[in-house]
Amino acid sequence: MGSLRSFIKGGLLILVSMFMLTATPLFAATASEQNAALSSENQSTEYKVELQRNRDYACTQCHKENKNGMHGTHAKAINPNTALPVTCTNCHGNISPDHRDGVPDAMRFNKDTFPVDKQNQVCLTCHQPEKLRKALWAHDVHILKTSCASCHKLHSATDPVKGLDQKGQIKLCVDCHSKQQQQLQAVVQLQQQSSSQQKEKEAP
């Protein structure tokens, strides 16, 4: 009888030992997975800062006429360099303390304040030349001679140039170059008049 009890006890001890050996890795794996999940959750929520104020708040306090549509066609655009929404300073730059006094510290597009190449460099920080070339060949021709804002409307609700068919594109070219032609003709006429007056003075 004593031998039978010893045999049963020995068998139970072996079974318990085998169970502990097989269960320990399972418990360890479960604990490891739980720790990994907690770590991942902490990383996703820790140090996450969300901007509460509109990035353009300082600008729109003075430029109130366009407060509700300051960006125009850029309202929903994402800056590819920062992966954040486009802001006033992305295009116009940071202002100085003398900005309110009229100091030309902010980029002004389609104005003589800044040369054409400086204006277009701002646009090209986001708009890639290769894509512009594919969209319309005229981009290559005008990139160093005409500001982008000469054709594109920056703050309007829609850019009238976008979506033009071939006929509309040709009309845009003709309208602009017709004005240039008229200006050129006016200059030539003035030169001719000046030359004729000079000849009359020099005549005996």
Image (spheres, helix red, strand yellow):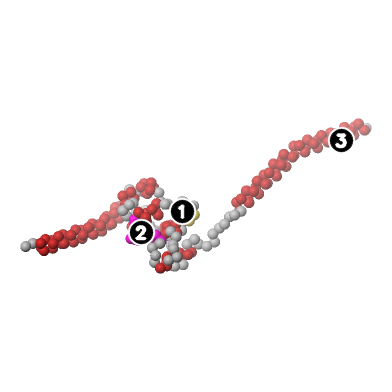
Q: Is residue 149 magenta?
A: no
**How far across and how far down the image is residue 203, in percent?**
8, 62
Extreme-right residue of the structure: 1
**Residue 157 makes an appearance in the image:** no
Q: Point out which mark residue 114 bears.
A: 2
Residue sitting at x 42%, y 52%: 126
Mark-to-mark CA distance, 1 and 3: 74 Å
Residue sitting at x 39%, y 59%: 107
Of marks 2 and 1, which one's residue comes earlier in the chain? 1
Secondary structure beneath dot 1 equals strand
Which one is nearer the viewer's eye here, 140 or 26?
A: 140
**How far across and how far down the image is residue 58, in percent?**
47, 64
User: From which residue to which does the magenta span run?
Assistant: 106-116
Residue pointed to by mark 3: 9
For label 2, the crowd category at 10 Å Cα-Cα, with few meaning under 14, some 14 to 19 and many 20 or more, is some
Name the kind of residue labelled 2 in the image.
Phe
Name the kind of residue labelled 1 in the image.
Asn
Residue 100: quadrant of the picture: bottom left
Select label 3 or label 2 by which is in front: 2
Describe residue 202's horizontal placement relative to residue 83 as left or right.
Answer: left
**How far across and how far down the image is residue 99, in percent?**
42, 65
Name the kind of residue labelled 3 in the image.
Lys
Residue 191: quadrant of the picture: bottom left
Question: What kind of secondary structure does the magenta stretch mostly adopt?
Answer: loop
Residue sitting at x 54%, y 59%: 51
**Residue 117, placed above or below residue 25:** below
Describe residue 200's horizontal placement relative to residue 15 as left or right.
Answer: left
Select label 2 or label 1 by which is in front: 2
Q: Quadrant of the C terminus?
A: bottom left
Which one is nearer the viewer's eye here, 203 or 172?
A: 203
Q: Point out which mark residue 79 bears.
A: 1
Q: Is residue 110 magenta?
A: yes
